[in-house]
Amino acid sequence: MDSMILVELGIILLLILANGFFSGAEIAIIAAGRGVLRQKAEKGSRGAQRALDLAGDPNRFLPTVQVGITLIGTFTAAFSGAQMGAKLANVIRMLPLPESVLKYSENIALGIVVVTLSYLSVVLGELVPKRLALKNANVLASFVAPPMHWLAVIARPAVWVMATSTDAVLKLLGSKGGDHPEVSLDDIQHLLEQVEAQGEIEQVEKQLAVEAMRLGDHTVREIMRPRLEMDALDVETAEQEVLGAISMAGFSRLPVYEDNLDHIIGYVHLKDVVRQQYLGWGIHLRKLIHPALFVPESLPLDRLLRLFQEHHNQLAIVLDEHGGTEVMVTLEDVIARHKVRIE
């Protein structure tokens, strides 16, 4: 009897540890540095390559984790309740307790099993594995990725059945399914908070990362300056006044207009003007003008940053609904906005 109890306890412990493996594997693969994994993969690490493949295909990886955790949790609860509950109830009946208490021995046993199992599942099956995974994500990701890959292959039919069943239920409820990311920005923010709690990153670094991810929630309108504060050069500005005008504006790039501010024809770069003056060449603004980047005020900030990168530019002219110049925005304006929010 004693040996059977030890075997059953061992089985329950293994199930809890298996749950911990899935929890830790999920965090390790999500939190692992992609740059580190790529370097390992280039050196021939198959585990690192598997980790990169799984991280790049969350629709295949995350459902596998959920299937594993759900099945193990269900089996653990059923096995412990059936096997340990009855044995513990027998032990309670042998204790010198009042009859009024002993008649609830099965309920008491079940309560003890549930509380103990919940405690062990949270500590050994969730918290400890996740903390270890956060601290050693780069190493553990390469280690757990190969078995997770094969589990994903094996569980593919189960994942397909569940996805199909979910879509069918949603259809019956009149809800149209859509392609939604398995990992949301809130999930990533929660992960960053956990990493911060472990002391791996500073609070300001976490806030900067969160702000960068949520740039798409904000538009150019939120960082625009009033038009009256906009500095620009008339294309007919005298040569001897150009360098001074740009220097007084305090920007390395300055819009150039013809007739009025509603007719921006491009921008001039301070370095071009300085080079012309240093070489003793004439400063003719029309010859130094670069094409301007025009954007609407409703443009999301993440798209603005992509345009800056694509056009190798750090200045954009914001147009109003009538096509007139409203104001200019720069890369520094975007950065300054985040400095204000984190200070």
Image (cartoon, helix red, strand yellow):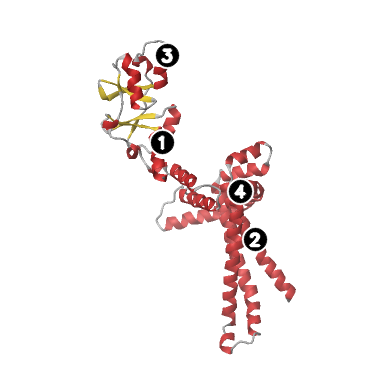
Q: Residue furthest bottom?
A: 99
Depth-wise, is mark 3 or mark 2 nearer the camera?
A: 3
> Residue 75 vs residue 339: left or right?
right
Q: Position of residue 242 (x, y in %)?
A: 33, 18
Vertical placement of 78 versus 194: above or below? below
Q: Which residue matches tag 1?
A: 303
Question: Number of numbered discs present?
Answer: 4
- Disc 1 from disc 3: Cα separation: 37 Å
Q: What residue type is disc 2 on?
A: Leu
Q: Position of residue 9 (x, y in %)?
A: 68, 69
Q: Residue at x 36, y 29 (%)?
A: 316
Q: What residue type is disc 4 on?
A: Ala
> Residue 299 vs residue 213: left or right?
left
Q: Which residue matches tag 4?
A: 137
Q: What residue type is disc 1 on?
A: Arg
Numbered circle sitting on residue 278: 3
Q: Residue at x 73, y 75 (%)?
A: 2
Depth-wise, is mark 4 or mark 3 nearer the camera?
A: 3
Q: Secondary structure at mark 2?
A: helix
Q: Quadrant of the N terminus?
A: bottom right
Q: Earlier in the sequence, mark 1 or mark 4?
A: 4
Q: Earlier in the sequence, mark 1 or mark 3?
A: 3
Q: Earlier in the sequence, mark 4 or mark 3?
A: 4
Which quarter of the picture shows residue 315? top left
Vertical placement of 103 versus 111: above or below? below
Q: Quadrant of the C terminus?
A: top left
Q: Secondary structure at mark 1?
A: helix
Depth-wise, is mark 2 or mark 4 nearer the camera?
A: 4
- Disc 4 from disc 3: Cα separation: 54 Å
Q: Which residue matches tag 2?
A: 17
